[in-house]
Amino acid sequence: MIEKSSGITVTEKMLAEFCERSFLKLWSYPNPHKDDGHELCDLIAVFGNTIFIFFDRENALPEVPDKDPQVLWDRWKRNVIDRQVKTSHGAERYIRSGRTIFLDAKREKPFPIHFDRTIAVIHKIIVAHGAKEACERASPQNVYGSLAITYAETNGGPTQPFHIEIDKRNPVHVLDSHNMPIILRELDTVSDFKTYLDEKIRAAVAFDYLSYCGEEDLLGHYFLNYDTATKRHVIGPKEKGQINGVMIGEGEWHDFVQTDLYKNTKNEDRISYFWDKLIQRTCQNSLDGTLGGNSNIVCGESAIYEMVKEPRFVRRGLAERMLTAVERFPDTGSFTRQVTLLSSFEPNVGYVFLQLRVPEEFRATLDYREKRQTLLEIACGSAKNKFPNLVKVIGIGIEAPKFSDGTVAEDFILMPCETWLEETKSHYEELNREWNFFGTPNLRQYNDRVTQFVPPPRPTRPAQPRKIGRNELCPCSSGKKYKKCHG
């Protein structure tokens, strides 16, 4: 069982809630501490060898009529931005030093996730609250009251109000009260969030300057700027040329979210959260200490770990296929099984989705769960035999929902199979003789194409009435030709 903080301040609690959705329960931890008892950061999230450290600071930028706005801004920036930037660099040095991270101030609960500090990618993220209203008052043209950001080689000196310069040689990410929920809502998988931040750092380092009016505007530019050659979203020009800087204008996000493309995609994505529920339920069981099996999903690779890697649009495709398989489960007898193979976003990785319907007396036996897990393993091994290119197979086994009593019990298996010996192949061939997974003549293969953004369906034209020839039979059922009936 793992006990962790849920945040202390209101804004920390909000950050923790958003991160639990994005990074899931097992990989995000609010208020970690150093070995001297001081807080390391406000929240740390670790997945693989990517580390996200968040620093949340709230301090209202006051409106004082008899004070110079520049002086007020400089003071706010020093307290909220500059100090947190310095703190974030110190936290990175602490992490890379290999010193112990704790979940509590008493230093009794060590951080449960292991990572390689020598190769870890560390994203430092500052969430600054308090300037939104002042920014809106100062400039009616500011759509949302977001902070403007420029990455360049800078010493971090004074800037114009509501504009922050960040040294691109040691970059941090700065979000604010408005765009923090947008970023974590739109990039609500580890894969999507990491890919965006990686591309942002690449662009900041590649160009002399990267400037934008608000983080949400940069995100809008990123979504709309897809490079078909590399099959990824990029920031800045898709082709290298004589361009030394990138500036993103205000309103990119505002205009993007008004499009039918965006609205339809959000509607289509709703089904994808079925995938998230499978993961979250198992993660909560792990935190509560009620998870069965021999997989440590916190510290090592597991089926859940592989499922978390999937980006949002791939989760949509996976969930659609799984739910379609659930709906089409046949009503052919008291003992029925159906297996579906699904493709991952990761190359040469597949999911085996096994549904079972068994008689109640069989389910009541003490070793039923063990037998069900064994059957899932046979299905995974048979998938590897049928599709030799697979290097990993993830098995997901459930009671067929169409015929279950409403209880939820899933089995998960991770089968690494890049090395597949002949005796292993023969072993699963022998076990599969009784079940014939992926060997029946009714096996069907479908090629699906899943895209990140889904255009709305085109409106269909109403059918035009067809003219009836004078020598055709009349549709009035008289049996006469049209010209005889109607002249």
Image: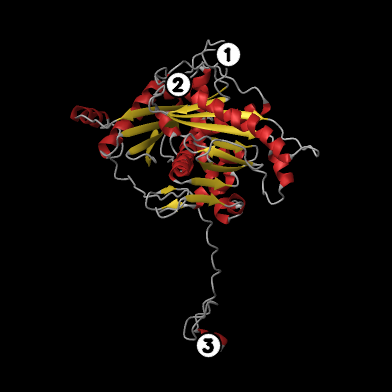
Q: Amino acid at mark 2?
A: Ile
Give the CA distance from mark 2 to mark 3: 87 Å
- Does residue 89 lie above or below 469 as drawn? above
Q: Percent x, y for residue 235?
A: 47, 48
Q: Nearer the viewer, mark 2 or mark 3?
A: 2
Left-right relation of 282 to 374 = right
Residue 450 appears in the figure: yes
Q: Which mark is residue 484?
A: 3
Numbered disc 3: secondary structure: helix
Judge the density around disc 3: few (<14), some (14-19), many (≥20) Cα neighbours within 10 Å.
few
Label 3 close to label 1 by CB (< 8 Å): no
Q: Amino acid at mark 1?
A: Ala
Residue placed furthest toward the left? 422
Residue placed furthest toward the bottom? 487
Judge the density around disc 1: few (<14), some (14-19), many (≥20) Cα neighbours within 10 Å.
some
Numbered disc 1: secondary structure: loop
- Does residue 483 lie above or below 122 as drawn? below
Q: Percent x, y for residue 438?
A: 30, 39
Q: Which mark is residue 113?
A: 2
Numbered disc 2: secondary structure: loop
Left-right relation of 332 to 454 = left
Q: Nearer the viewer, mark 3 or mark 1?
A: 1
Q: Percent x, y for residue 184?
A: 56, 37
**Residue drawn at (32%, 45%) of the image:** 442
Residue 326 appears in the figure: no
Instruction: Name the foreground residue: 211 vs 109.
Output: 211
- Does residue 448 lie above or below 484 as drawn? above
Mark toward the start of the polypeptide (2 vs 3): 2
In this figure, which residue is indicated by the disc labeled 1?
105
Instruction: Name the foreground residue: 65 vs 416.
Output: 65
Mark toward the start of the polypeptide (1 vs 2): 1
| The C terminus sits in image quarter | bottom right
